Image (spheres, helix red, strand yellow):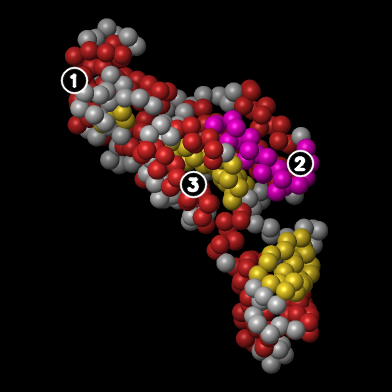
């Protein structure tokens, strides 16, 4: 940010207007903006030659670039950053957009996973981008744990929470498990877990196994460790991420470079790349945050932007996030209030359920 501030100070009123209009035209059309087209929109009457000189100065500052020698100018990543931070005019949420998001509360709002899935679909539909919704971890106290053998190489670990919520995950048990070791592991875990949240259980499980090694059969100890690892594994964070509207991004694929960028994005979304960092990014500051191009550390490509906002529970603790990802020429002024409203709506639903 410190590099960008002097650029605004160096720009006089004409340079600022040229820069703003270039960015706005680019965000609307996706095409390079020429000096002649700007002469028709400037607030003062200036020649195309004068505008070209201003564009050259802005290019020298690193705010504009020229994809081809004879083409018009497009904003650079630095230029988009400056525009978003200093010149972006965020509009009010459109009534139709609000109504489409509010509609998600109409059916079975008590079922939070289904609600968040519908919100993700509505968000992608409204913004015409790909939506990301990171769901909260379940933090209620555990009531009961059970292991169910499905096959020699497949088992199910079932967690029942005090609020009635049930989670189950498939996993590969250690070889040689017997019905008695399954029962022993379940009894050990149920006694240890009762009244504790899953995050608390994960922190003490290893210590308890070590301390009570003589009390628990070796097979049962292995089963406890492998079964609970399903929840401790970073990969389970990816199951908390709902991605909707990936097909919307295909509309941007007008050439091979765009298609390659979109394929790369799809690959990252399929792998749920670095999803644990998704929430960390939002925790660095309240409200909506915008990551442009290579600023977006979540994905390997640089040609995308992410608009994201955290949401909070009744205790004002950040527990999840919603966002929209698309090309760098997103309509930021429209999408920011949509993402902000959606995050506030999810937070209100969580608070009302508490």
In the foreground, 9 or 212: 212
In the foreground, 198 or 314: 198
Q: Tell me the crowding category of disc 1: few under 14, some 14 to 19, or many 20 or more residues within 10 angstroms, Cα based.
A: few
The residue where tag 1 is placed is: 53
Give percent across and percent down for residue 244.
59, 42
The residue where tag 2 is placed is: 109
Sequence-wise first label, 3 or 1: 1
Distance between the alpha carbons at the discs numbered 2 and 3: 30 Å
Q: Quadrant of residue 246?
A: top right
Q: Is residue 9 above or below residue 234?
A: above
Asked if the residue at tag 3 contacts the one at tag 2, i.e. Cβ–Cβ closer than 8 Å, the answer is: no
- Residue at image coords 47%, 41%: 306
Give percent across and percent down for residue 317.
61, 51
Q: Quadrant of residue 292?
A: top left
Q: Quadrant of residue 37?
A: top left
Sequence-wise first label, 2 or 3: 2
On the rendered structure, is 222 left or right of 24?
right
Q: Is residue 198 visible?
A: yes
Q: Secondary structure at mark 3?
A: helix
The residue where tag 3 is placed is: 266
Q: Secondary structure at mark 2?
A: loop
Q: Secondary structure at mark 1?
A: helix
């Amino acid at each position: 940010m410190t590099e960008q501030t002097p650029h605004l100070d160096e720009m006089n009123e004409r340079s600022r207007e040229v820069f703003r209009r270039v960015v706005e035209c680019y965000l609307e059309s996706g095409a390079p903006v020429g000096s002649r087209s700007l002469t028709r929109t400037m607030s003062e009457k200036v020649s195309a030659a004068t505008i070209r000189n201003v564009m050259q100065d802005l290019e020298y500052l690193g705010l504009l670039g020229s994809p081809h020698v004879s083409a018009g100018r497009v904003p650079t990543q630095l230029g988009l950053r400056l525009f978003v931070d200093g010149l972006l005019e965020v509009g009010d949420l459109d009534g139709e957009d609000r109504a489409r998001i509010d509609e998600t509360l109409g059916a079975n709002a008590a079922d939070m996973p289904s609600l968040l899935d519908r919100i993700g679909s509505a968000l992608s539909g409204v913004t015409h981008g790909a939506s990301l919704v990171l769901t909260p971890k379940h933090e209620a106290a555990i009531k009961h744990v059970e292991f169910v053998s499905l096959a020699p190489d497949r088992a199910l670990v079932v967690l029942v929470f005090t609020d009635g919520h049930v989670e189950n995950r498939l996993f590969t048990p250690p070889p040689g498990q017997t019905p008695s070791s399954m029962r022993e592991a379940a009894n050990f875990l149920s006694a240890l877990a009762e009244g504790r949240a899953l995050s608390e259980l994960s922190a003490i499980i290893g210590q308890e196994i070590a301390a009570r090694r003589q009390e628990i059969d070796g097979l049962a100890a292995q089963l406890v460790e492998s079964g609970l690892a399903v929840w401790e594994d970073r990969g389970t964070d990816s199951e908390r991420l709902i991605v909707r509207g990936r097909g919307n991004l295909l509309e941007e694929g007008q050439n091979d470079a765009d298609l390659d960028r979109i394929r790369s994005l799809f690959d990252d979304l399929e792998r749920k790349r670095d999803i644990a960092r998704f929430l960390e990014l939002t925790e660095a500051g309240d409200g909506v945050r915008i990551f442009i191009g290579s600023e977006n550390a979540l994905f390997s490509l640089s040609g995308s932007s992410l608009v994201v906002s955290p949401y909070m529970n009744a205790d004002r603790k950040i527990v999840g996030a919603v966002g929209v990802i698309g090309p760098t020429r997103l309509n930021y002024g429209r999408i920011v209030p949509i993402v902000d409203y959606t995050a506030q709506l999810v937070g209100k639903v969580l608070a009302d359920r508490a």
